[in-house]
């Protein structure tokens, strides 16, 4: 019952998020009637996901067959949930897929393409005037924070590499690595030449 | 169990809560209870069970194994909690029938589902569980949630459900049952006979209906008795799952 309760809460939250994207539910409707089994190998637990035009149903005790089964450790499942490129995670060696993989890929596609309209949900609570104002302010703040973080990172990198000389700059490091590679190759060639000469001397002694 | 006995006028007697009434009057008295509580049925379910009824119904849906294209009958479907979920599961190629003997409950359920856009693959039928108006071998799954204890002749209802199921089809009976521990049983008794009628009085201004609810639960067959009733009716592989320490049990049987 506890797991059932947790899944019910998770399902409620996921479906609220899905409803914020106007295209997600119609796309999930195309998967209605399909059952996706998720088997976590470590730690061991299993879960069934049933998409419909109402959202996703999460079931711990589904007593029917599954159209597709995904087997993976928890770390891979987490990466699948968080990663932007979900296909790359699905193709990793520790992830196993059985059955109609197109169903899972379609579901993954829906989740990957989510474009959440937070402002619409905010508008329901705060009204049509306050919501765009707050939304615009939040967007500007987010953009400013992102730009500031990028700028800070560039400035810090430049200071550490160029002014304080605490760290080696990226380009300088690349040049040094290229020189090292070149030296390594030269040494390997020299070693090969020595071996060839040693071999020819040995064969002349024998003659 | 019905515990049928003959009264002095030779009419069989059955129970209505703790009272004995002639069989012909039970359906009418149960109908009065549900006419009275229909409007606030969902609210009362949430208050009285602390929202647990939603988890019990979730588990029922999970064990139903209903798939796209299936035909499902939800008896005593009330306000349509199970029917709504089944409607999504069976999809446009399937069919869900929400049946209830009580017109008020059926009306609340129908309005609620239509308001939520659940339509197209769902039908609403006023029907008596003992005499289901459907052909033999018609449904893939039949459910009855918190309804069987209100039926006058439970054995007849179970046989009727068996008849309308396809071979291999499942019957799921979700119903209050007997708590598995003595401590829980005592707490549950105190809760049922003190809090439930009081909540009924405060919310629906009807304490009698909720006193009947508490009494009818005590008169309902326990887990093993209901299991043997299903086996006797002809169901195969009958199992039950206790939930919340046996306060509620989900019985499942397969039509051979």
Image: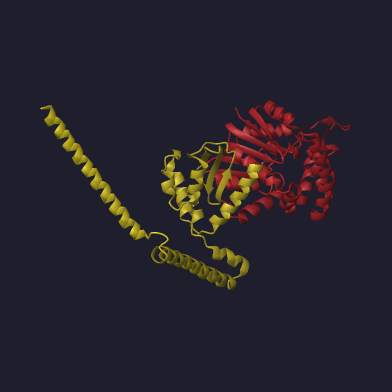
Residue A51 x %, y %: 52, 47
Q: How is the image coloured?
A: by chain
The answer to whether residue B126 is above or below residue A151 is: above
Residue placed farthest to the front in the image?
Answer: A205
Q: Residue visible at 67% across and 50% down?
A: B109
Observer-nearest of A67 and B41: A67
Q: Quadrant of the N terminus of chain A?
A: top right
Residue B111 x %, y %: 65, 54
Residue B59 x %, y %: 64, 40
> In the rendered view, does B34 fall on the left or right side of B166?
right
User: Can the viewer see residue B134?
Assistant: no
In the figure, the shade used to draw chain A is yellow
> In the rendered view, does B78 fall on the left or right side of B188?
left
Q: Quadrant of the C terminus of chain A?
A: top left
Observer-nearest of B114 and B67: B67
Residue placed farthest to the right in the image?
Answer: B8
The answer to whether residue B242 is above or below residue A108 is: above
Q: How many marks?
A: 0
Observer-nearest of A38 and A65: A38
Observer-nearest of A101 and B201: A101
> In the rendered view, does A92 fall on the left or right side of A47?
left
User: Can the viewer see residue B223?
Assistant: yes
In the figure, the shade used to draw chain B is red
Q: Residue visible at 59% across and 72% down?
A: A130
Residue B188 x %, y %: 80, 41
């Amino acid at each position: 019952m506890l797991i059932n309760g947790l899944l019910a809460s998770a399902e409620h939250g996921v479906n609220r998020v899905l409803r914020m994207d106007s295209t997600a539910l119609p796309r999930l409707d195309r998967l209605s009637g399909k059952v996706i089994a998720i088997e976590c190998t470590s730690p061991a637990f299993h879960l069934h996901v049933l998409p419909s035009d109402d959202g996703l149903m999460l079931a711990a005790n589904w007593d029917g067959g599954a159209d597709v089964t995904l087997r993976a450790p928890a770390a891979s499942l987490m990466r699948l949930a968080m990663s932007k490129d979900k296909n790359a995670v699905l193709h990793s060696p520790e992830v196993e897929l059985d059955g109609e993989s197109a169903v899972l890929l379609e579901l993954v596609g829906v989740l990957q393409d989510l474009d959440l309209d937070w402002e619409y949900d905010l508008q329901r609570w705060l009204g049509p005037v306050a919501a765009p104002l707050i939304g615009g302010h939040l967007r500007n703040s987010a953009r400013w924070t992102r730009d500031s973080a990028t700028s800070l990172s560039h400035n810090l990198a430049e200071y550490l590499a160029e002014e304080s000389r605490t760290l080696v700059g990226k380009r300088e490091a690349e040049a040094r690595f290229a020189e090292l590679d070149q030296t390594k190759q030269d040494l390997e060639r020299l070693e090969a030449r020595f071996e060839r000469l040693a071999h020819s001397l040995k064969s002349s002694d024998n003659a | 169990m019905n515990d049928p006995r003959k009264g002095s006028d030779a009419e069989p007697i059955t129970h209505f809560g703790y009272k004995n009434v002639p069989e012909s009057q039970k359906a009418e008295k149960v109908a009065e209870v549900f006419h009275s509580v229909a409007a606030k049925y969902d609210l009362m379910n949430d208050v009285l069970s602390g929202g647990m009824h939603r988890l019990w119904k979730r588990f029922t849906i999970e064990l139903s194994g209903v798939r796209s294209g299936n035909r499902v009958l939800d008896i005593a479907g009330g306000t349509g909690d199970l029917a709504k979920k089944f409607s999504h599961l069976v999809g446009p190629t399937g069919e869900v029938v929400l049946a209830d003997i009580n017109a008020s409950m059926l009306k609340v359920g129908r309005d609620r589902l239509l308001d939520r856009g659940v339509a197209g693959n769902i039908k609403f039928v006023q029907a008596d569980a003992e005499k289901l108006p459907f052909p033999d071998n018609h449904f893939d799954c039949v459910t009855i949630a918190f309804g069987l204890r209100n039926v006058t002749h439970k054995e007849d209802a179970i046989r009727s459900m068996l008849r309308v199921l396809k071979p291999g089809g499942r019957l799921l009976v979700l119903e209050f049952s007997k708590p598995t521990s003595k401590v829980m049983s005592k707490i549950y008794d105190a809760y049922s006979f003190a809090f439930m009628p009081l909540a009924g009085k405060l919310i629906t201004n009807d304490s009698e209906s909720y006193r009947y609810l508490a009494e009818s639960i005590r008169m309902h067959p326990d887990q093993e008795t209901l299991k043997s009733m299903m086996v006797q009716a002809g169901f195969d592989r009958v199992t039950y799952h206790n939930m919340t320490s046996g306060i509620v049990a989900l019985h499942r049987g397969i039509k051979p």
